[in-house]
Image: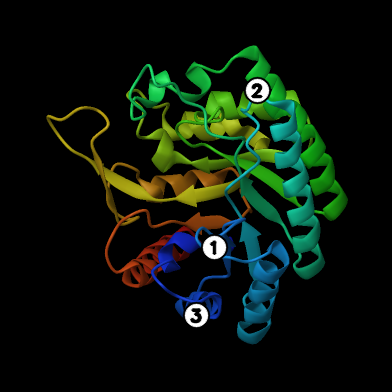
Amino acid sequence: MRNSLILHVNYVEQGQTILEMCEKAVEWGYDGIEFRRKRSKVDETPEQYLDSIAEAVQKTGLKHVLFGGPGANLMSSDDKVREKEIEECITFFKLAAKRFKLTVCNTMAGPLSTKAEPSYKYDKQGSAIATSKQWKWASEGFKTLGDLASELGFRFAFETHMNYIHDLPEAAKKLVDMIDKGSVGINLDYGNIGRFPKPVSLSETINICADRLYYVHLKNMFRLRNTPYNSFIACGIGDGIVNNRKFLRILKKNGYEGAICLEAPRQGDRELFAKQDIAYIQMLMKELG
């Protein structure tokens, strides 16, 4: 099994420069990095940001550059806001495609929650409260962005993420089917799905995504006993409630050839976590053949 292994940028957002991010990713054995579309608290233009990445990639030989959130926020009822969000995405990815050979990019359609329920009650947020208009706004917006991706030669993949309209596998597949563009699919993050009260099984989730599974995120967490269902603690990819050995086995059986992104949403020495997590995944991939 030899899928490209991608470092999620959250492993190296503890003061590292872009050059250091790329140097470390290559040193640790990753094939690429999933960067954010925008950096917070950094005063720079999209051109400056992308040029910094391009320079670092050239110096280090990093093979793949991917981009993730924020996606276009299409949940606003203001037509002009949604139009601006789409325009900003179009501008960014046109600039990115001039600098990198894009393959797949993680994306989202904007946060969706209600104050009537705590945000951690994920089954009361996202797709559970989405209106027909919000489904329409998301699908219409990504029809446009899907055409852009086709033009530029890459694909978008909606991350299954709580508090978004594409939070669960059924919802993500519904949205992708509404968009009906081969350039728009699903980024399966089962670690997010596992936070729901009654998550669909890993096998069934992969079956739901079917041939629209374009990207995969791996992470893990412990569920605390005798606490509300929202109580989780992030942990190493080899620990926790998600059996990532089984995850990779099913992916191999199904012929999945896309990229696999490792993620570290936990505190501490994330550089150490990056090395530990890839060693575990490389071991599994070698065992699976």
Q: Pick the residue in front: 184 or 284.
A: 184
* Crowding near the residue tagged with mark 2, few <14, some 14–19, many ≥20 C-alpha atoms within 10 Å: few
In this view, the residue farthest toward the left is 226
Q: Which SS class for mark 1?
A: strand
Distance CA(mark 1)–CA(mark 3) = 16 Å
Q: Amino acid at mark 2?
A: Ser
In this view, the residue farthest toward the bottom is 59
* Crowding near the residue tagged with mark 3, few <14, some 14–19, many ≥20 C-alpha atoms within 10 Å: some
Which sits earlier in the primary sequence, circle 2 or circle 1?
Answer: 1
Q: Which residue in the protein does label 3 denote?
A: 20
Q: Which residue in the protein does label 1 denote?
A: 6
Q: Amino acid at mark 3?
A: Glu
Pick the quarter of the image with the N terminus.
bottom right
Q: Which residue in the protein does label 2 denote?
A: 77
In this view, the residue farthest toward the top is 132
Q: Is 167 placed above or below 190 here?
A: above
| Residue 202 visible somewhere in the drawing | yes
Q: Is 265 placed above or below 78 here?
A: below
Q: Is residue 27 left or right of residue 232?
A: right
Residue at screen point 35% across, 23% down: 198
**In the figure, residue 107 lies in which quadrant?**
top right
Percent across and percent down for residue 136 are 71, 20
